[in-house]
Image (cartoon, rainbow, N blue to C red):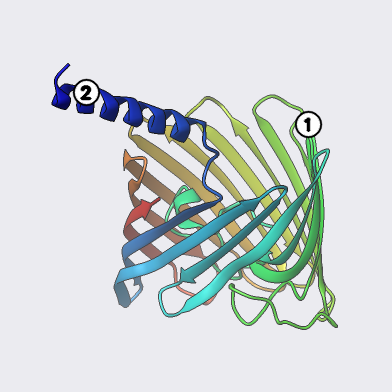
Amino acid sequence: MKTHTKLAVAFLAAASSIAAQAADAPAPAVTFDGYAVATADYTSTTGSSTSTMGLTAAKFGATGKFGNVTGYASLYYGGSKTDLLDAYFTVDVGGGLTVTAGKFLSYMGYEAFDVPNMAQVSYAYTQFNPVPAYHSGVKIDYSTATYGAGFALVDSLYGADAYKGDGDLKKPGLEAYYTYKGIKDTTIWFGVADDVATKTVFYDLWASYALSKTDSIGAEVIKVESVGTEWLLAYTKGLNAKWSLTSRISEDLPTGGSSNMKYTLSPSYSVNDHFIVRAEVSYISSHGATPSSTYLAAQSIFKF
């Protein structure tokens, strides 16, 4: 056998051995995720209008897995500044029980915080948004195929902004939830939260039903003591493999104030697994001193 033929055979054997070893190797201990969102929108009210365009959200996160401990941290740009968003670790105790400590997102709310997980551009509620976002503390969760439950002790329900709590554990916030998944294609979720400092109690009940692999319907009712009630009803229809359309109606009912109704249509086009184009048209019908308005938006979402 010629020398160059022997070398070629040896090279192929070595390459095959390396490939086999790579296939058997464990997954990397650290993985990354994130997204970037650009939005152009236009709001029209009686006698005036406003418009904006630019980068409205960006997130970069890293997950590290070390045995039964998983850590996650992320940086988030919300249109004006960059914050440390997530910073927590979770210990899998076993039997469906986990313990998490650090800075994490609230249990509460039907609509997602991260833009790629939303079904439309804007949130449902317009007069007041009582849904807590990020805070720091510790939480315990238990989950089975049929139900799940969790309890969190955090520094506060509401901090200076949506990205952190107030940092004062002397005036904590409490959260608890129970979810039932024993009915096929259905999730029923109920949560209660208490901001000890302000004695504000928050109740959140939502349910979702998957009509098919592409179609779903969801509903939510939120009650905040001394603040008001809000509700939404949303339906997402898959038009084909790329297109979907979300229809939503929602209402704000502030205590002692006038209500607002919001009507939303939002089509989405999935270019591929990493790029989504979304649009929205919403009309807010105001029954108080605030004028009614129309909202138009287009959004591009890159995720990885």
Q: Residue at x 45, y 80 (%)?
A: 81
The vertical placement of 160 against 130, above or below, is below
SS of the residue under disc 2: helix
Q: Which residue is mark 2?
A: 6
Q: Position of residue 10 (x, y in %)?
A: 28, 27
> For this view, does 31 lie left or right of residue 148?
left
Mark 1: amino acid:
Thr
Q: Nearer the viewer, residue 23 or 185?
A: 23
> How many marks on residues?
2
Q: CA distance from mark 1 to mark 2?
A: 61 Å
Instruction: Check contact, mark 1 vs mark 2: CB within 8 A.
Output: no
Q: Residue at x 40, y 28 (%)?
A: 17
Q: Residue at x 59, y 57 (%)?
A: 251
Mark 2: amino acid:
Lys
The answer to whether residue 177 is seen in the rendering is no
Q: Position of residue 166 (x, y in %)?
A: 70, 82
> For this view, does 128 lie left or right of residue 187?
left
Q: Which residue is mark 1?
A: 146
Q: Residue at x 46, y 47 (%)?
A: 119
Q: Position of residue 288 (x, y in %)?
A: 55, 72
Point out which mark residue 124 bears: none
> For this view, does 208 lie left or right of residue 54?
right
Is disc 1 surrounded by few (<14), some (14 to 19) or many (20+) residues within 10 Å?
Answer: few
Quadrant (top left/top right/bottom left/bottom right) for the N terminus = top left
SS of the residue under disc 1: loop
Q: Position of residue 214 (x, y in %)?
A: 47, 30
